[in-house]
Image (cartoon, rainbow, N blue to C red):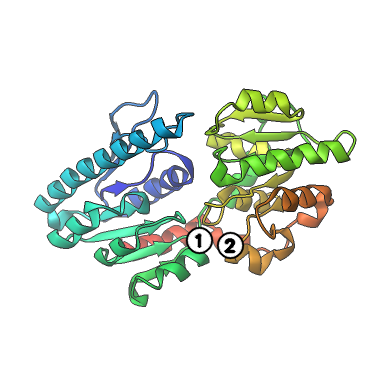
Amino acid sequence: MPSCPPQKDGGAIYTRVLIPYLLGRPSVRSILVVTETAKGAKIIERDGRCTFFRLIPDAKRFHPSAAMNRPWRIFSMGFAQLILSLYLFAALLRRHRNLIYVHDTYARGVVPTLIRFFGLNAICDVRDTVFFPRGMAAFSAVIACSMNLASRLARHVPVEKLSHIPVPFDIGALRRSAADPPPPLPVNDGYILFLGNVCREKGAHELIEAYSRLRAAVPSPPPLVLAGRVLIADADVIAEAHPGVFFVGAVRHDAVPAIISKARLVILPSRSDSIGRVILEAIALGIPVVCPPGIAEFDRYCPRCVLPEISVEAIYEALMRPPEEFIAREYPIDDHDSEVCLAKTASILGL
């Protein structure tokens, strides 16, 4: 069963959960993962019955200059289309043995066209807010990880092909991991936590500016910790100009529960997340959360935790409120139980 998930970020976390589960199904003999290159990782790596081909350049590689960054993105996505096209042609030669599972990152360009032309059995898993709607018709089934995505996809995908399956994770394992010692941070606990790529799409600039206003208004506020790949220019200069702001870089996924558990508040003022895994994990751990606007699950189950908009003023007002007001007790976190969600995915895959 070939698969094309991204190497990094939430999609990679999901892939690490999904692959062992699928390998446990009797009908799955092997899995081939065609994915992005990763620093320090082998281009071709075999792990039991799973083989990783890390051949696709990282389209999210950051360069401080937008003019320099754009050509790299164009090249990397073009090269990705070439690699995946070759892969699809190889899959055609073994049509009756393969099921193709495609992350929406790659469900664009020539890939849907070739899937339709070759008549391949392919499933698309849509986990990003930006997807290629015209390519969805090529897939025999489409999975959406949030209510918003399911609603948007319903305009392009027949209802019988579309399924909404929440983001899965092992809630029990998450809570056990939260008791582990966290990795060294500039502050031990009681911090405001932002976890994810530090970039404009995630509202990082507005958050830092709002925090500066908080420091001016409140004596000794909790520090702000930004954990994730730093994709903004001059992060060191920004940290120096904004006391109490700490960029700690990317953290291991297995360390995330412990980091969340020590936070006073988890905030994600994102414009790009379809739901926000870090928010769900914080809710499961009982940590107060400030959620991005426009996500149906949060609007329905914890509206008082949702930012009215992504702006410095809205974030500042949220930071000024007591964190106890942001505990999402009514959110049905058990809907994300990994066994239930993965069983639904396997059923759609016909496994």
**10 Å crowding of disc 1: few (<14), some (14-19), many (20+):** many
Kind of residue sitting beneath label 2: Ile
Kind of residue sitting beneath label 1: Pro
Q: Which mark is residue 78?
A: none
Q: Please, what secondary structure does the residue beneath circle 2 have?
A: loop
Image location of residue 280, percent across then percent down: 61, 53
In the depicted view, which residue is nearer to us: 200 or 146? 200
Image location of residue 98, percent across then percent down: 19, 54
In the depicted view, which residue is nearer to us: 242 or 249? 242
Which residue is the site of mark 2?
A: 295
Image location of residue 277, percent across then percent down: 56, 50
Compared with 26, 78 (above or below) is above
Q: Measuring 64% from the left and 35% from the top, which residue is drawn there?
A: 226
Name, please, the residue furthest toward the bottom.
Answer: 159
Name, please, the residue furthest toward the right.
Answer: 219
Image location of residue 336, percent across then percent down: 55, 59
Which residue is the site of mark 1?
A: 166
Compared with 170, 218 (above or below) is above
| N-term-proximal mark, 1 vs 2 | 1
In the depicted view, which residue is nearer to us: 133 or 300? 133
Any part of residue 219 in sight: yes
Q: Measuring 56% from the left and 63% from the top, which residue is drawn there?
A: 335
Q: Nearer the viewer, mark 1 or mark 2?
A: 2
**10 Å crowding of disc 2: few (<14), some (14-19), many (20+):** some
In the depicted view, which residue is nearer to us: 254 or 243? 243
Quarter of the view holding residue 140: bottom left
Relative horizontal placement of residue 217, taking residue 126 as reference (left or right): right
Q: Measuring 59% from the left and 62% from the top, which residue is drawn there?
A: 294
Name, please, the residue furthest toward the front.
Answer: 67
Q: Please, what secondary structure does the residue beneath circle 1 have?
A: loop
